[in-house]
């Protein structure tokens, strides 16, 4: 019995996970990579669209928004962005990098 081919949704999730882990700066790899691994499959289509827009943002800018060093523009203050900012591993991951 052959496996079913991956759906477009499966392919999208794999692509987003890869992009989440391969950002450019290690802190963003850790933040978004862990988020993608643990939370992404629970996101609905709107949240995935918002996540995809977020990961297009340059690393330093997005890092500053997530850590609160800069205020994110209103169009990026979405439920998925709030989830990333409050994600349980965030403080531990950043502490490991800066500690």
Image (cartoon, grey):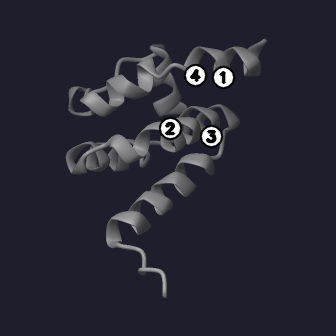
Asked if the residue at tag 4 contacts the one at tag 2, i.e. Cβ–Cβ closer than 8 Å, the answer is yes
Closer to us: mark 2 or mark 4?
Answer: 2
Q: Is residue 3 above or below residue 52?
A: below
Q: Secondary structure at mark 4?
A: loop
- Residue 93: image tag: 1
Question: In the rendered image, which quarter contains the C terminus?
Answer: top right
Asked if the residue at tag 3 contacts the one at tag 4, i.e. Cβ–Cβ closer than 8 Å, the answer is no
Work out whether residue 30 or residue 3 is closer to the camera in this orientation and state it. 3
Q: Secondary structure at mark 1?
A: helix
Q: Which comes before the other along the chain, label 1 or label 3?
A: 3
Q: Which comes before the other along the chain, label 4 or label 3?
A: 3
Q: Which comes before the other along the chain, label 2 or label 4?
A: 2
Say few, some or many: other residues with alpha carbon within 10 Å of mark 1 (under 14 / 14 to 19 / 20 or more).
some
State the residue at coordinates (50%, 38%).
Answer: 38
State the residue at coordinates (56%, 56%).
Answer: 18
Residue 30 on image: x %, y %: 63, 34
State the residue at coordinates (65%, 16%).
Answer: 92
Q: Is residue 95 above or below residue 54?
A: above
Tell me, yes or no, if residue 36 can be seen here: yes
Residue 82 on image: x %, y %: 33, 23
């Amino acid at each position: 019995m052959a496996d079913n081919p991956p759906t477009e949704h499966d392919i999208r999730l794999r692509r987003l996970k890869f992009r989440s882990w391969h950002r450019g700066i290690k802190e963003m790899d850790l933040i978004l990579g862990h988020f993608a691994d643990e939370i992404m499959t629970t996101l609905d289509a709107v949240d995935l669209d918002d996540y995809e827009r977020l990961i297009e943002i340059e690393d330093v800018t997005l890092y500053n928004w997530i850590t609160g060093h800069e205020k994110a523009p209103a169009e990026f203050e979405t439920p998925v962005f709030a989830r990333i900012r409050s994600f349980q591993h965030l403080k531990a991951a950043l502490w490991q990098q800066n500690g």
